[in-house]
Amino acid sequence: MLHRFGSPATTALNGGRYFGFVNGGALPSALAARLLADVWDQNAALHVMSPIAAKLESLCERWLVDLFDLPGRTAMGLVSGTSLATLCGLLAGRDAILRRLGWDASERGLFGAPPLRLVMSEAAHITVRKALAILGIGRAQLEIVAADEQGRFDAAALPPLDERTILILQAGNVNSGAFDPFEPLCRAAKAARAWVHIDGAFGLWARACESTADLTAGIELADSWSVDAHKTLNAPYDCGIALCRDRAAMVSALGATASYLQFGDERDGMLYTPEMSRRARGIELWAALKSLGRAGINQLVAQLCQRARQFAAELDAEGFRILSEVVFNQVLVACDPPAITARTLELLQASGECWCGSAEWRGETAIRISVCSWVTSEADISRSVAAFVAARGRASAEGARQ
Ligand SMILES: *Cc1c(COP(=O)(O)O)cnc(C)c1O
């Protein structure tokens, strides 16, 4: 029944012409490791529950800190995705700031706590707002800074920061792929003793690629980072990574204990995540990192960016308008005239040739392309561009008949 009714109702996320949202494909090595982990049915809460899960999480932590070139003692927690990883980073930041102000949030709660300031750009991802709401930080507490025409934090508009502030930055705007100017912003935050969190769901991987690492200059100055393994790295769902410079702050925010739990000297994964029982995501994450290696990751990220540039160049040559600079794996495109963009997208989605989503970009409807799968080839891009041209042709013919 599952195959008969289920398979036709799936989406070919793991095909080469799926460009929706920022959904990565699945590396065969990681997928196979995941299947094995599920057959083992490991629970990654404690070392005694699964020594292998604990060991591979420790290795992943070390490798990722190295790969992203973060401060040496940075701690890692594995969660379902960046939504939760961001929550972890902001929680650690919230509690660390309150503690500095003489308020122990785990003891006294949030009612009556000294107010914090939250500074972020208008282009911050929706999951950041959701995390803040969960953390008891209301919309009225947010200081929203304008984004520039590429969707980057406008550093000139940064308000004065202080030690009560959490500054939230972004590596990879979900539409344009743009990176915030980390260097000046992080330096200002450091000088003011503010906490910096970086949402790098797909963009933090730029750091692991020679040709894009410059985009992330300065992120090492931040305090916490969130990133997905299931996007750019192409690990299977669900695999999010929370990273925090101050290991003690992370454990104090997320750790919990009870007499029946057996903690040890080895890594106990539950100390770094909101959950206790968890799938052993470290196993497939380890497999993805191990099978690709540093060179393979460099190559994967470079390839995604290169295909995105190819997509933009071929669409441009066909008379489509590219709406933002292609700096990473995202492309925003519209038709000329703009009135037929939405219908073109509808026909494109119905064609089955490729799949793209849409977004509003600076007041107009854009077709939104995310090149995020290791499978996508040059031929996939060209075939998709042909589908764009065909869809636009039908959309304008319909327009002419009306
Ligand atoms: C995808 C994404 C998120 C949310 O990540 P999930 O893994 O879906 O929870 C957050 N921020 C950005 C920039 C993203 O692209």
Image (cartoon, grey):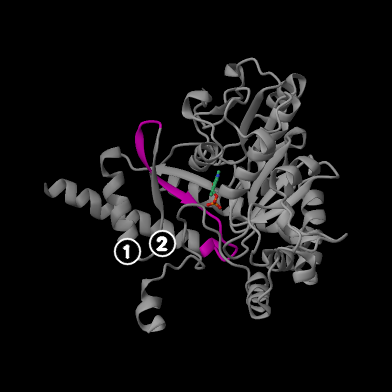
Counting from the top left corner in percent of width and height, residue 51 is at 80, 70
User: Which residue occupies the extreme front position in the image?
Assistant: 259
* Magenta-tinted stretch: 362-379
Q: Residue furthest left?
A: 402
Asked which quadrant contains residue 90, the reply is top right
On the rendered structure, is 49 left or right of 124? right
Q: Is mark 1 within 8 Å of ligand 1?
A: no
Alpha carbon distance from label 2 to label 1? 7 Å
Residue 168 x, y percent position in the rendering = 61, 32
Please rate how many residues cluster around mark 2, counting C-alpha atoms within 10 Å: few if below 14, some from 14 to 19, many from 20.
many
Amino acid carrying label 2: it is Cys
Which residue carries the number 2 mark? 354
SS at badge 2: loop
Can residue 2 be seen in the rendering of this structure?
yes
Asked if 247 appears above or below 94 in the picture, the reply is below
- Say which residue appears at 59% left-offset and 65% top-offset: 236
x 57%, y 17%: residue: 157
Q: Is residue 373 above or below residue 341?
A: below
Q: Nearer the viewer, residue 19 or 233?
A: 233
Q: Amino acid at mark 1?
A: Ser
Asked if disc 2 and disc 1 are in contact, CB closer than 8 Å, the reply is: yes
Residue position marked by numbered label 1 in the rendering? 351
Q: Classify 165 as above or below 327.
A: above
Quick one: quadrant of the N terminus? bottom left
